[in-house]
Image (cartoon, rainbow, N blue to C red):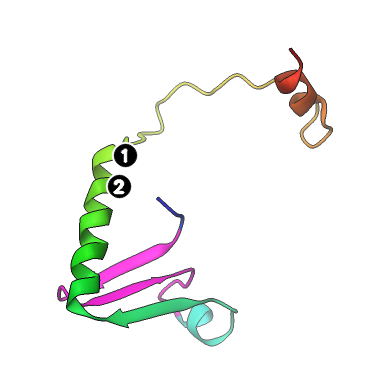
Amino acid sequence: MIHAKTMLVDDRLVMVGSMNLDFLSMQWLEEGCLVVDDRPFAREFERRRQEDMARSVQMTGREPRPRRPAGRPGSGAAAATATTP
C-alpha cells in the first residue's frame, strides 16, 4: 500500500494524492491529486484496496518498540552495524 490520501465516492469517483481536504492544502500548498470519474476504474481501485486491507495489520500503539542499533541517528553507525556480517 502506498502512503497517499485516497477516496472513493459513489462507486465511480476516485481521488488519489497527497492533498488534505482543507483550505491550506487546496489554496496554498503544492499538493497533488488525481481525480478519475470512471466506474470500472473505481471497481478495480476498491478491489485492490480490499486486498491491501486484508494483508494489513492494525497497529494499536501498544506494540513493543523495536530495538535500534547503537549509534547516533544519521551518523551511519546504525547502518554499518546492521549490514556488517
In the image, 45 versus 29, the foreground residue is 45
Residue 58 appears at what percent x and percent y? 31, 37
Q: Quadrant of residue 33?
A: bottom left
Q: State which region is magenta.
A: 4-22
For label 1, count other residues whose C-alpha is less than 10 Å away and answer few (under 14), some (14-19) or many (20+). Answer: few
Q: Quadrant of residue 5?
A: bottom left
Residue at x 18% of width, y 67% of height? 43
Residue of label 1: 56
Asked whether the viewer can see residue 14, the reply is yes
Residue at x 46% of width, y 55% of height? 3
What amino acid does circle 1 point to?
A: Ser
What amino acid does circle 2 point to?
A: Asp
Q: On screen, 9 above or below 64?
A: below
Residue of label 2: 52
Q: Quadrant of residue 42?
A: bottom left
Residue 66 appears at what percent x and percent y? 55, 22
Do labels 2 and 1 touch, CB within 8 Å?
A: yes
For label 2, count other residues whose C-alpha is less than 10 Å away and answer few (under 14), some (14-19) or many (20+). Answer: few
Q: Residue furthest top?
A: 85
Q: Quadrant of the C terminus?
A: top right
Residue 65 appears at what percent x and percent y? 52, 23
Q: On screen, 5 above or below 60?
A: below
State the separation of the CA atoms marked 2 and 1.
6 Å
Residue at x 36% of width, y 80% of height? 35
Residue 44 appears at what percent x and percent y? 23, 64
Element class at badge 1:
loop
Does residue 31 appear to the left or right of 77 in the view shown?
left
Asked whether the viewer can see residue 70, the reply is no
16 falls in the magenta region: yes
64 falls in the magenta region: no
